[in-house]
Amino acid sequence: MSKIIQADHFRSGMTALRNWDVPLRMYYDETNNIRRLSLSEVGLNVTANKMFAISGISLGPGQELSGWEELRRAIHIQSSAAEVKFKHIAPPDYEAALASRKLFDVLTWLLHNNVLIHYSVLDVLYWSILDIIESLMPDDRLLIVPFHLELKNELYDAVCIEPGAFMSLLHSFSYPNVERSRVQPFIEAVLYFIEQSVPINRNVVTAMLKQTLRHAARLPGLELPFLQGNEPGDLISDFSFHFMHCIYIFKYASHVFDQESYIERSLQSFDIWDGGRRLNYRFADSQGEIGIQVSDVITGLLGRHFTYLRNHSLPALRKKKATFSELQTKNLDLLRKLIDQSDAFSNGLFHTVLPLDTIYKNNAFLHEQDTPGYLG
């Protein structure tokens, strides 16, 4: 029997989001779903350098997708093709995808039809290590709650310098199941790694991170609540929580996901309800759902977009953008307009679990916003 989970259990304490109670029709697809992330003596089971994204399109009450068949003909999709996917629209490389005329036609069609887009993006490496800081936050002796995002960002920056070495360190402590008797040596080992990886502080928060760990290592009775009672090496068991997030945020919407047996099995253990009403979510064959097919294109683009940001410095991003062709620039502008249009409707349509640096790079690359000076 499925366990019943109440949507308002997750929404309680949240600031109300614009239009989050509107009965939208939301369609989804996903990319870079590694299913699970585990750590062993040989390191991670996968290369954690791509962004997991679940994203797609949203339609308002009574809104329909008009002109789909005309668009298919315009972008020369064979009539015999059962469905449209990202691979039919653009090449796999992000820069090459932005140079696709077919992508331009699809993004333009979405804007003309006032279709909203949404995304939930997760950096799996960041997700795997942020509990180190999360576990220090409850201890009132450290006073780091107001700065936890900045501290997580600096930890992630240090880990990215030598991720293999850091994973070996974590494995030696049975992470994420650090024995209470080894808490102090664990904190000291993390501090030593950061001091060796980042000997020169790149900003004031780098120094704050080192000082926080130094202080924590000296605290008697320090607990790491999120790093105890777990299965050693089990960093991400599945992505069902991120599917759940999409559902409970817009609890009055209908949610249509692409068929994915692994996620379906994960979600079968519980049902999400609003009082006595089961929320409206289902899995469907993409061949029969235009909304999922369009979501495949959007998700393919967004997954590549955020992975591209993750893997390039801000100076490199600026240099590359300056060399973009007219079509690449137009497609990037169309993506920005779709995001701005959707954000104007509801800030609940966008959810990220990303280090601040990636968020800053996205703000600069896509929205021309100022960024902290340390990023270059």
Image (tube, rainbow, N blue to C red):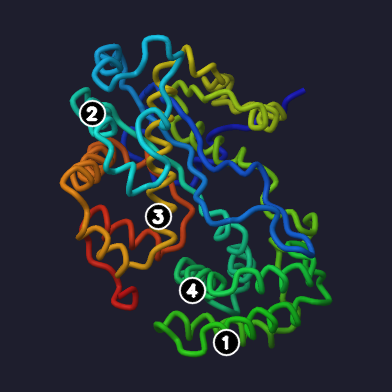
The residue lying at 39 percent from left, 82 percent from top is 203
Q: Earlier in the sequence, mark 4 or mark 1?
A: 4
The residue lying at 46 percent from left, 47 percent from top is 121
Determine whether, in the image, residue 143 is placed left or right of residue 86.
right
Q: Where is the N terminus found, in terms of image quarters?
A: top right
Q: Secondary structure at mark 2?
A: helix
Q: Earlier in the sequence, mark 2 or mark 4?
A: 2
Query: Disc 4 residue type?
Result: Glu
Whole-Å distance between the Cαs marked 2 and 3? 22 Å
Q: Are marks 3 and 4 in contact (CB under 8 Å)?
A: no
x, y percentage for residue 165?
A: 66, 74
Query: Disc 1 residue type?
Result: Glu
Q: Earlier in the sequence, mark 1 or mark 3?
A: 1
The residue lying at 77 percent from left, 56 percent from top is 230
Identify the residue under disc 1.
195
Query: Disc 2 residue type?
Result: Asp
Q: Secondary structure at mark 4?
A: helix
Q: Earlier in the sequence, mark 2 or mark 1?
A: 2
Q: Secondary structure at mark 1?
A: helix
The residue lying at 37 percent from left, 34 percent from top is 298
Q: Secondary structure at mark 3?
A: helix
Identify the residue under disc 3.
308
Q: Are marks 2 and 4 in contact (CB under 8 Å)?
A: no
Identify the residue under disc 2.
105
Along the viewing direction, whichever of 80 and 13 lies nearer the viewer: 80
Q: Is residue 331 above or below residue 276?
A: below
Identify the residue under disc 4.
154
